[in-house]
């Protein structure tokens, strides 16, 4: 991976400021929890049951918040307020695997770096006593008397504030968008060539240069009716005949930051299904415009229901008003997931429900059990905006069972059912001013 379009001087300066912010957050978090030191192990490999095969390594997100390092298991960040932070960098002597290269990059000058060759060598470098440390990690990162305690007060504070991305993080997230776009372009081309879901997935991975272990989540690549399975990851090896529609939900990772992008296509560009896609696309851009400081994300979600039902009314799929469709749950049958979620170090980033940096949960609106973001938007937050319309047999059956069959024009449903569904998803950055759509400019750059 490269830092294309990120001049070295800029990234150096952005990182320095990012680190200052992280230290300030850590100072407060430690004070709240009553601890002297912050210890963050990067995590270690996990093995399959009764087997010597490891699962794909997933770095501790608390660790990659500090460092652009996603492949250094058994390493540590150690921070004590007022002191230069330390990285304990595990670089084993190992001729079986590729070992992490020597520490390099824009972060190294900010840390005291200690190379260790065995995980247990970290023990001599950790500050004591262990009881004075907030240690954020998984149980298997325990080392001697250092056992992850994940203090609630510390985690609540750090996670709450992680919603506010630093300019450094925004720069990396823009790059995560750019990395994904060639994949989306290649995937569309593969769809138009009649490739299978598996073939399209391979075209995507090849163009992005990332495989399953590196991508921020499993690609969702669906043809025809499969688009009605929200998290479809089956990847059929043979192509349907014909391929009518294509929905791809796929991102990329850049130094630990995720992008999460969905596009929908009809094979026949003059079809009514393409017209429905176009209507959702226009509506999605409008919804992104709602990502403004002071706006309750729950309201955006409810507004999205009304907008989408307006589209279904225009296309003759529902026979009732958007308000009536929302009130009766008909709307949730066609749009059965949340409008979006926070995104950053994790594709579904933390603290979407956080009431404050001391805890508490902002509830979802009644009848919307899958919404992952209930906070009021503030500058620095990045959320996805991902409206969708689907033709899902199980949910449409429930509409009938619930006595609302007369709200729907079933002949129109039958006409759209073979196409599965539509979703359009971008990342939108809330600023002091107009929202910044992070995704669309990346598509505009790569035609
Ligand atoms: N790719 C999963 C999601 O959109 O939330
Ligand atoms: Mn998403
Ligand atoms: Mn997605």
Image (cartoon, grey):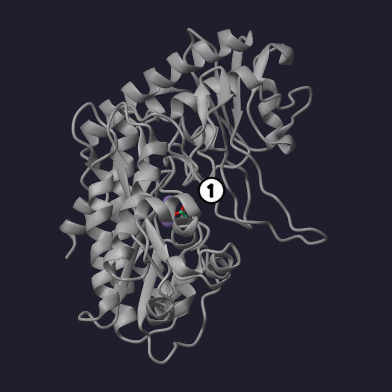
Q: Secondary structure under badge 1? A: loop
Asked if residue 5 is positioned above or below residue 291 in the image, the reply reads: below
Q: Is residue 5 left or right of residue 120?
A: left
Asked if residue 40 shows in the view, the reply is: yes
Is residue 139 or residue 335 the one in the foreground? 335
Residue 302: % across, % down: 39, 44
Res 181 quadrant in image: bottom left
Q: Is residue 162 left or right of residue 322?
A: right
Is residue 402 or residue 434 the one in the foreground? 402
Residue 255: % across, % down: 40, 44
Asked if residue 104 shows in the view, the reply is: no
**On the image, numbered disc 1 is attached to which residue?**
370
Asked if residue 266 is positioned above or below residue 400 in the image, the reply reads: below
Residue 245: % across, % down: 36, 78
Q: Residues within 10 Å of mark 1 (few under 14, many from 20)?
A: few
Specify the farthest residue to the right.
Answer: 50
Residue 415: % across, % down: 38, 81
């Amino acid at each position: 991976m490269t830092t294309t379009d990120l001049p070295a001087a800029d990234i150096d300066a952005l990182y320095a400021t990012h680190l200052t912010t992280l230290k300030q957050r850590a100072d407060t978090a430690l004070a709240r929890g009553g601890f002297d030191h912050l210890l963050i192990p990067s995590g270690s490999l996990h093995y399959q049951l009764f087997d010597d095969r490891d699962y794909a390594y997933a770095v501790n997100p608390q660790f990659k918040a500090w460092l652009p390092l996603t492949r250094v298991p058994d390493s540590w960040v150690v921070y004590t307020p007022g002191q230069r932070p330390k990285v304990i960098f595990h670089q084993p002597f190992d001729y079986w695997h590729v070992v992490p290269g020597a520490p390099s990059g824009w972060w190294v000058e900010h840390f005291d770096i200690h190379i260790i060759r065995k995980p247990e060598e970290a023990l001599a470098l950790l500050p004591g006593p262990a009881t004075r440390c907030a240690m954020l990690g998984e149980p298997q990162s325990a080392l001697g008397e250092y056992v992850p305690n994940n203090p609630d007060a510390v985690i609540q504070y750090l996670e709450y504030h992680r919603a506010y991305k630093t300019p450094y993080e925004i720069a990396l997230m823009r790059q995560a968008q750019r990395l994904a776009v060639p994949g989306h372009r290649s995937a569309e081309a593969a769809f138009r060539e009649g490739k299978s879901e598996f073939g399209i997935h391979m075209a995507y991975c090849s163009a992005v240069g990332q495989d399953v272990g590196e991508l921020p989540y499993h690609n969702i690549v669906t043809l025809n009716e499969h688009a009605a399975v929200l998290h479809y990851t089956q990847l059929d090896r043979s192509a349907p005949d014909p391929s009518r529609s294509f929905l791809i939900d796929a991102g990329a990772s850049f130094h630990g930051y995720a992008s999460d992008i969905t596009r929908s296509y009809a094979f026949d560009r003059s079809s009514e299904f393409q017209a429905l896609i176009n209507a959702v696309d226009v509506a999605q851009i409008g919804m992104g415009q709602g990502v403004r400081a002071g706006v309750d994300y729950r309201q955006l979600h409810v507004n999205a229901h009304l907008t989408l039902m307006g589209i279904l009314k225009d296309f003759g799929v529902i026979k009732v008003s958007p308000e009536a469709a929302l009130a009766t749950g008909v709307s949730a049958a066609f749009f059965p997931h949340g409008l979006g979620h926070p995104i950053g170090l994790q594709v579904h980033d933390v603290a979407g429900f956080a009431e404050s940096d001391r805890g508490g949960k902002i509830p979802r609106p009644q009848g919307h059990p899958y919404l992952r973001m209930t906070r009021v938007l503030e500058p620095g937050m990045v959320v996805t905006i991902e409206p969708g319309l689907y033709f899902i047999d199980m949910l449409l059956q429930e509409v009938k069972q619930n006595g609302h069959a007369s709200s729907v024009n079933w002949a129109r449903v039958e006409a759209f059912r073979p196409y599965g569904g539509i979703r359009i998803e971008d990342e939108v950055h809330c600023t002091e001013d107009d929202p910044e759509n992070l995704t669309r400019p990346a598509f505009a750059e790569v035609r």
